[in-house]
Image: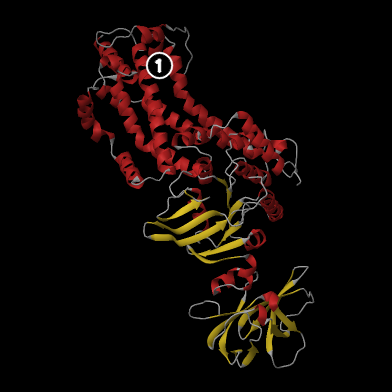
Amino acid sequence: MMDQTHHASETSLSIKGLQLSFGAVQVLNDVNMDIRQGEFIVLLGGSGSGKSTILNCIAGLLDVTDGQIFINGKNVTWDEPKDRGIGMVFQSYALYPQMSVRGNLAFGLKNARLPRDEIAKRIDRAAGILQIGDYLDRRPAALSGGQRQRVAIGRALVRDVDLFLFDEPLSNLDAKLRAELRVEIKRLHETLGNTMVYVTHDQIEAMTLADRIALLRDGVIQQFASPGEIYRKPVNLYVAGFIGSPSMNFISGEIADGQFRFHDRAISLDGYDGHPRDGAAILGVRPEHTGFQADGPESGIQATVELQEHMGAESVIYLRLDGQRFALRTPDDTHYPEGTRLNLSFDIARASLFDPQSELRL
Amino acid sequence: MADIAFSGPRGPKPRRRLSGRNIMIYGTLIVVALYYLVPLYVMVMTSLKGLPEIRLGNIFSPPVEATFEPWVKAWAEACTGLNCEGLQRGFWNSVRITVPSVLLSILIASINGYALANWRFKGAEFFFAVLMIGAFIPYQVMIYPMVILLRELGLYGSLTGLVLVHTVFGMPILTLLFRNYFATLPEELFKAARVDGTGFWGIYFRIMLPLSLPIFVVAVILQVTGIWNDFLFGVVYTKPEYYPMTVQLNNIVNTTTGARNTM
């Protein structure tokens, strides 16, 4: 585990045609993934999207309806969780309350009948990496949330496995602690070089941690790509609306003669990264890719200020454009009172166009 | 990272003052408790009196001349039919019935509840529904079928048979109790134990049992009081030499009061 040679081409985890139904309800539909050795994969989606379900299938805690799961090339679809070579970290930490921290770490190793000195060695190493050595003899009840989650990570660590599974590990922590532990998990991944599969509904966690994000909706992977790719080129309207806060603004119109037209206005599509075709379309512009001018000409894209949120480093202005809400984000913290008219400009090179029927990106 | 666990207020928990509200509450509780203790007091006092003193009828007054003779007589000499060993035989029968019945019923019911709550096997819902229906059928309906069943098993009239009956009749409510308790334990704990390589029994004995002491206490209280005080099953499914204390006491009281009436 500690060897730093990354086998970039080696597949660590492979999911083929995974299906899961509970009675008539289809929870996962044809999920396919190939995850390379050492990759950090985030499964992102809202509640009910099936992200945790996939993780439970990988762990062997749920029996799949159809499909196969390979870990390090071995078909583990019907193996017991303990035989899959995984370590798992849970949202509620799931520490055994009746055991000390040391007991929690040792529990799985004792079950595997490891020699006592080997167990002690692994606990020492994990305690060193996670800085939990000071409270090895305490019960989980005597620890703070952050400390408990470190212990839970330690329990996965001592198993000495290639594949780590995280099921919303930071969701029960407060914002400050969450940010701290997020950085630590990132650092841990860089130190250990393990493959990690991480489930979250928090897009910040997904964007900061992932090598690749699998964005899920209703048990179907919408897009499986790097965070940058998902941010820049969302494959469909759902992905575009899910990633980014505030959400991407959508404007209905049509494409003709290399221009996007809406409400008698036309924007040139020069520099657009994609393949626009003539006909009805939806333009998606992120709040941070919208420029504005306070005293521009009467022509152009004019919108009225409804509300402004100041966040110190930046501010978000909510506007009304052709009767629809439009958000823009700016480092400018000048206060624009309600009713101020602003002239907007869109950064077309970083915008997205969608087909209104198929909802796919053009 | 900063150790944030032990910051915040320190020192012993502030104690509430003796307020008028508290005096009212505790006063009422004490009065009610005394009220419920009165019958016990009367019983103990009366048992310490001789018969002439009882006939005076002052049931609340302490005995003028305390005597333990009736106690000894009840325990070791009272007769039921031809047997004059006193209540001690019934007492030890009750112990021999209650202890194995309580242990066996709780052991089986807790495993049932654990399997139903955590290992959702095929048909679990159906199995649970059947058990629940069992809880709503009056015992009296099943007395005779049970007699036949025990007879066929060759256990009719034996202590083993009665233990079996108590175990079976306790099953629906105890299973419900355990299933619902296990369902409240975090599911992730169960998952973590599976990842750590623990199987069905390992999780039950090493994870679930240590966390379930409260519900085991409830189950023990429920079963001990129920089985210790049982009369009906004791009289139906055993023979005189195995009668629990409740049945034997009833017989002693019936025969002795009959004798007194002829005096």
Q: Position of residue A356 (x, y in %)?
A: 51, 81
Q: Residue at x 45, y 34 (%)?
A: B201
**Residue B227 drawn above or below residue A84:** above
Indicate the quadrant where residue A123 lies.
top right
Compare residues B234 and B259 and report the one nearer the observer. B234
Q: Position of residue A259 (x, y in %)?
A: 61, 90
Q: Residue at x 61, y 29 (%)?
A: A116
Q: Is residue B17 visible?
A: no
| Residue identifier under label 1 | B57
Compare residues B95 and A228 and report the one nearer the observer. A228
Indicate the quadrant where residue A25 lies.
bottom left
Q: Position of residue A1 (x, y in %)?
A: 63, 45
Q: Position of residue A316 (x, y in %)?
A: 71, 73
**Residue A206 drawn above or below residue A230:** above
Q: Quadrant of the C terminus of chain A?
A: bottom right
Left/right of residue A211 with respect to residue B67 in the rendered view: right
Q: Residue at x 56, y 70 (%)?
A: A239
